[in-house]
């Protein structure tokens, strides 16, 4: 039950724009100036997005889904269930770094679902090492656990793809930056409330 556990896309009450998180990611990731809907300039209809998972380029926002890189259900099962609702809602809308939320091909994102690297890897081989690095970074930043199968698969993929181990590092500066971003934005979801009738034990895939 995503809305109960993580809320929805939010429009940050502390900024001065009408864009919700989806619109902000589309705006950030488009390689060309975006085109807004004629009757609603808060909604993006077109742009140019290169999906890192498939390597394909899209121009219609309808073809794009916003992927939570470490999916919500995966995060919930690996530690987010113990967080406050505000922390989970911030996680679902987090823009502290550009790979937490990504504009990707809709069908490919559905194929990924809530799977970890032991059950899904993107078909674009050029993105393999970066995918693994980003996955580990998010798990580290948010203190999320990994299953044994997940960890073993990541280690094997790193070896098999001859990934540069130097890129699998996180500096103290990065850690402090994310801690500050979290602190500065924890109230982003203050106007969003979970649905009282929902049960916390069931969370749908991303």
Image (cartoon, helix red, strand yellow):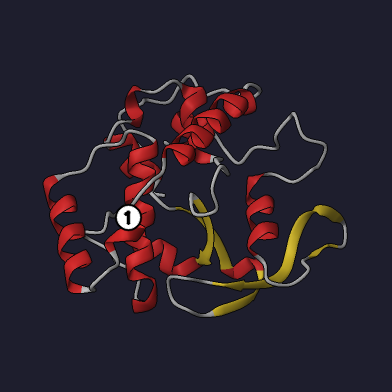
In the image, what residue occupies the spot 53% across and 36% down?
177
Instruction: Evaluate whether residue 135 shows in this view.
Output: yes
Left or right position of 7 against 31? left
In the image, what residue occupies the spot 42% across and 26% down?
198
Residue 36, above or below 100: below
- What percent of the width, then of the height, locates residue 104? 51, 65
Quadrant including the N terminus: top left
- What percent of the width, then of the height, locates residue 42? 80, 51
Identify the residue under disc 1.
168
Left or right position of 183 against 202? right
Towards the viewer: 198 or 33: 33
Disc count in the image?
A: 1
Towards the viewer: 170 or 78: 170
- What percent of the width, then of the height, locates residue 61? 66, 66
* Crowding near the residue tagged with mark 1, few <14, some 14–19, many ≥20 C-alpha atoms within 10 Å: some
Residue 40, above or below 122: above
Q: Residue furthest bottom?
A: 56
In the image, what residue occupies the spot 61% across and 71% down?
49
In the image, what residue occupies the spot 27% across and 54% down?
116
For the residue labelled by badge 1, is the local secondary structure a helix, a strand or a loop?
loop
Q: Residue furthest right?
A: 39
Residue 93, picture quadrant: top right
- What percent of the width, then of the height, locates residue 45? 74, 65
Towards the viewer: 142 or 10: 142
Residue 157, above or below 88: below
Instruction: Evaluate whether residue 204 shows in this view.
Output: no
Left or right position of 76 against 147? right
Left or right position of 107 against 166? right
């Amino acid at each position: 039950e995503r809305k109960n556990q993580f809320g929805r896309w939010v429009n940050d009450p502390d900024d001065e724009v009408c864009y919700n998180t989806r619109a902000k990611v589309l705006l950030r990731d488009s390689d060309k100036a975006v085109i807004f809907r004629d009757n609603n300039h808060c909604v993006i209809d077109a742009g140019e997005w290169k999906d890192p998972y498939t390597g394909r380029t899209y121009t219609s926002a309808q073809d794009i889904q916003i992927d939570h890189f470490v999916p919500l259900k995966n995060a919930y099962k690996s530690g987010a269930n113990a967080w406050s609702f505000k922390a989970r809602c911030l996680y679902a809308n987090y823009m502290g770094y550009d790979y937490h939320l990504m504009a990707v091909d809709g069908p490919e994102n559905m194929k990924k679902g809530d799977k970890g690297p032991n059950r899904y890897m993107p078909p674009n081989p050029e993105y393999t090492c970066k995918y693994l690095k980003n996955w580990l970074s998010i798990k580290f930043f948010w203190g999320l656990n990994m299953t044994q199968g997940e960890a073993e698969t990541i280690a094997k993929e790193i070896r098999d793809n001859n990934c540069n181990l130097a890129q699998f590092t996180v500096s103290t500066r990065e850690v402090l930056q994310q801690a500050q971003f979290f602190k500065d934005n924890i109230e982003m979801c203050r106007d969003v409330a979970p649905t009282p009738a929902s049960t916390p034990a069931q969370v749908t895939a991303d």
